[in-house]
Image (spheres, helix red, strand yellow):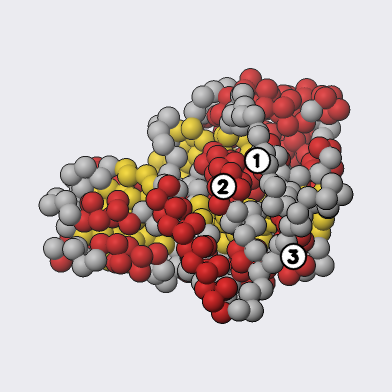
Amino acid sequence: MAKVLMKGNEAIAEAAIQAGCRYFFGYPITPQNEIPAYMAKMLPKVGGCFLQAESEISAINMVYGAAGAGARVMTSSSSPGISLKQEGISYIVGAELPCLIVNIVRGGPGLGGIQPAQSDYFQAVKGGGHGDYHMVVLAPSSIQEMVDLVTDGFDIADKYRNPVMILGDGMLGQMMEPVEFREKKTILPEKPWATTGNKEGKPRNIINSLFIDPQGLEDHVLKLYKKYDEMKENEVRVECYNCEDAEIIIAAYGTMARIAKNVIQMAEEQGIKIGLIRPITLWPFPVDTFKKWADSHHVKAFLSLEMSMGQMVEDIRLSVDGAKPVHFYGRTGGMVPTPKAILEEIKKIREGI
Amino acid sequence: MAHEVIISGFGGQGVMSLGQLLTYAGMLEGKNVSWLPSYGPEMRGGTANCSVIITDELVGSPIVTEATAVIAMNLPSLEKFEKTILAEGLLIINSSLVDSKTTRDDIDVIYIPANEIADELGNNRVANMVMLGAYLEKTRVVSPDSIIESLREVLGHSKEHLVPVNQEALKRGAQLVKNKG
């Protein structure tokens, strides 16, 4: 198919529809409003249902219900709205249901601002709701990748019966880039566990996250953790760019990874070799990739670049495990670091080596 | 070379659509492109702007901090973005609405009475296309034909009748640059 020019938010919505999503429940918030707007316009045309709920809390519980009934379903919001959805997300994980949740992150805490940020990293990857749980968190850095990850995200959710989150930011949601929708036949999996009525007298299916017996709950959580081990085994995605011979490796995802590529080019013009590790899955984190490059003799240090006060840097430090120094540079509150400022930071790190 | 442009004006002056047309045309010509709008409260009555990148290289950050060109549709836009232009870069000012001159002496400046020309063409809303015509004539980033093709794509069949006046506006903008030679 030919390339079209689309906003990130619209591309997410179109990709979801093409992936067979027919149910969207949400509540408006900037900077992701083009997603529900697109869904409101297009879902009725394909026999789907768009519903603007009375709050984020009801939206996520509608997702819970539709997922329980076996539907391919999604919701989207931005930071404060995603905070409100955390209780529901925890329930959906507990009840082992698949769905896609999109967070187009804005600056926080509190109501914060509306400009792009990456300060919801902890919330996304460490379990923003209560209880022992994880979900696969996908971090696209282009509009094309947003489209591809939406499709894959639904499939991953179904495969493990677990929610998947797309973690973008206001810039990726608002910007336009050429994008291609690859013809792909969507085959929705059978969901024999779904609560779809019991007319044929089949055994009752129960969707539930309540386990009063502590042994029963521990068994359940251990079962969930077996799934997380499989996700760690199968779902890690990462891009390594320019890492061969790099003396410093930048780690960045999403918007920051784009900016990092500008920095790498500027540095190269000045004879400085910089590489980039771009986690595409923030959970499961590409631990082995970091370990591998940390063991390389030419790599002297890592630098985590984030639009936050430093969150992913903790996972990098855990992965590198003291083998090499791990530095941090970031801006927050909706400020986006400039390539120039980052290059200055790199020069400072080099002086200290 | 990479063209990194900031287009800015009041909400309603068509700065977002000007940027989108340029981006779309760049895509049609096989270039790497991005379009990034300002979004937020400033769009309601205040200054709206967008950043467009058209390049043969990879597009990293879509934010333009050092512009090869700025298209300023009103005074606040001139004041806000004139300093972001690279030395020897281009500044196009809508002199219908902006009385001030630029304070920069190391850049190329073109003054275009865009609203007056649009009025002459009988459609005040094509002032943005007059500015775009001037920009294309000066930089040759994309061909005016690609812009018109993009416009047809964006407008759709029901607004096909608006194509000629837009085409004319592009030509008038280009003509002004040619005359200044």
Percent x, y of residue B170: 67, 27
Q: Amino acid at mark 3?
A: Asn
In-image side of A111 versus B138 (left or right): right
* Residue A161 visible in this rendered orientation of the protein: yes
From the viewer's perspective, is residue A59 above or below residue B156? Answer: below
* Residue B95 visible in this rendered orientation of the protein: no
Q: Compute the Cα span from label 3 to label 1.
A: 22 Å
The subunit carrying tag 3 is A
Residue A189: give its label.
1
At 43% across and 57% down in the image, what residue appears?
A229
In-image side of A5 versus A138 (left or right): right
> Helix, strand, or loop for circle 1?
loop
> Helix, strand, or loop for circle 3?
helix
Tag 2 residue: A159
Q: Amino acid at mark 2?
A: Lys
Foreground residue among A99 and B103: A99
Q: Amino acid at mark 1?
A: Pro
Q: Which of labels 2 and 3 is toward the front?
A: 2
Q: Evaluate if marks 1 and 2 touch, with contact meaning CB atoms under 8 Å apart.
A: yes
